[in-house]
Amino acid sequence: MTKRRDFIKTTLLMAAGTAIGSSSVATAKTKSKFTGIVYSADDPGKWEKKVGSHAPKVAVEGKNVTITTKHGMTEQHYIVRHTLVCEKGYVLGEKTFYPTNKKAVSTFTLPEKHGSVLYATSFCNKHDLWVTEFSV
Ligand SMILES: [Fe+2]
């Protein structure tokens, strides 16, 4: 489990570094060096038709961050996990789902020092790891 967390943290940090180091010119689709490993609305790779049901949506109200993945929850196909990660790679919140959960929705309270750039992740048991970067 620790190795998996380290992998996700390292991947997110590297993705953040790639995003920061990339051109500021806006493009419709932004490829990262993690294409095919971590998916996003801007870089959905082979899952382009899955963006709406897999890229995590984020709502911020005060210190609360709600992550929603608009995805069905059945025994064969469901959202396994959400995480909220800060730019430095610290996991600020995590929630594991089960097929018996009706929705993949999680709410986390931001700690005092969280930085302005955050990442919401959502992992589907069939369509891999997705990330949405956002600022607060
Ligand atoms: Fe899926």
Image: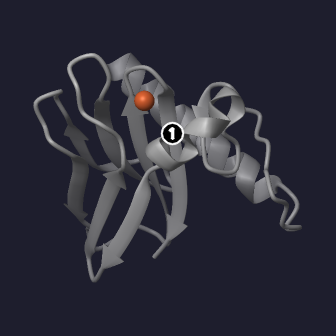
The residue located at (43%, 20%) in the rendering is 126
Q: Position of residue 128 (x, y in %)?
A: 49, 26
Q: Is residue 6 left or right of residue 74?
A: right
Question: Measured from the top left, where is residue 99 in percent x and y?
Answer: 17, 27
Q: Is residue 15 above or below residue 97?
A: below
Q: Quadrant of residue 133?
A: bottom right
User: Picture coordinates of residue 50 (x, y %)?
Assistant: 55, 38
Q: Residues within 10 Å of mark 1 (few under 14, many from 20)?
A: many
Residue 134 image position (x, y, % from top left): 52, 65
Amino acid type for the residue under numbered disc 1: Trp
The extreme left residue here reads 100
Front residue of 66/126: it is: 126
1 and 52: which is toward the camera: 52
Task: Answer yes or no: is residue 14 visible.
Answer: yes
Q: Which residue is mark 1?
A: 130
Q: For residue 123, what is the image quadrant?
A: top left
Please name the residue shown 46% across and 42% down the image.
54
Picture quadrant of ligand 1:
top left
